Image (tube, rainbow, N blue to C red):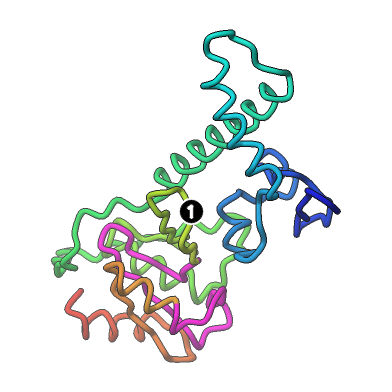
Amino acid sequence: MTGKIECMECKKFFSIITQTHLKLHNITLSEYKLKYPNAPTRSDESIVRSKQIRNNIFEKEDTDIITDEDQKNIEIILDNMKDRASTILKQIEKSPKLNNLDYPKIEELNDFKIVEFDNPGGYIHQDKVDILSFLLSKFQDVKNNFFVEKVLINGAMEYRYVTDIVLYNRKINIEFPNSFWHNFDVAKASRDSHLTRDGWKIINVNSTNHKVSDVIEELKKHNLI
């Protein structure tokens, strides 16, 4: 279709794939670009038109004449900018507070405190609940199935990974690659490489029993308990 580009989600054609349209598919513009890296979001015609709008705005300052079509395109551009800013702010709010980057050893508690990890609906397997409960008795920053995101300065999302368990203040990612509840989103080697590059410590619990004792053994290797 001349002057149009295809939305890879619904296969319809548009001049611009806008954030507003992508909301219908429950996906952000950044996630769309990550999912379809080779798919354009603006047609050549719309790019040329945007340049014309910018030129026309400056050319028409003396006469204050802006056509309805110009106004419509300006509003689309402003909406995209507003949506992008909102998305970035939400992603920043979700990002972990990275206070300690040296993975300090945590002092042993004098009295072992029994803590039961909240498991509404019982959807978390009991083996994992036991592990989460143990970690929560030792650390205060335990998160289950935590999303680790990296957003570039231009607003594009470089990656978004779902982890097994993290100690997010310490940037420690505890993975259980041989467990049936391990989160497989992308190739583990690639994900570990990206996270390690960005300051995360990866601890792999490779046993197949998924017991608290296995976690304790790995944490001791890294001088965390």
Residue at disc 1, secondary structure: loop
Residue 17: x, y in percent?
69, 47
Horizontal relation, residue 46 to residue 208: left or right: right
The residue shown at (59%, 58%) is: 33
Left or right, residue 152 beside residue 178: left
Give the residue drawn at x 68%, y 42%. 46
Query: Is the residue 112 above or below the residue 216 in the image?
Result: above
Which residue occupies 66% across, 57% down?
40
Image coordinates for residue 173, horizontal then vertical, percent: 36, 71
**Nearer to us in this view, 145 or 201:** 201
Q: Which residues are magenta?
A: 162-190
Residue 114 left/right relative to 146:
left
- State the image quarter where residue 190 is shown: bottom left
Q: What is the quadrant of residue 105 in the picture?
A: bottom left
Q: Quadrant of the N terminus?
A: bottom right
Q: Amino acid at mark 1?
A: Ala
Judge left or right: residue 208 versus residue 108: right
Q: Nearer the viewer, residue 108 or 202?
A: 202
Query: What residue is disc 1 on?
Result: 156
State which quarter of the image contains the C terminus: bottom left
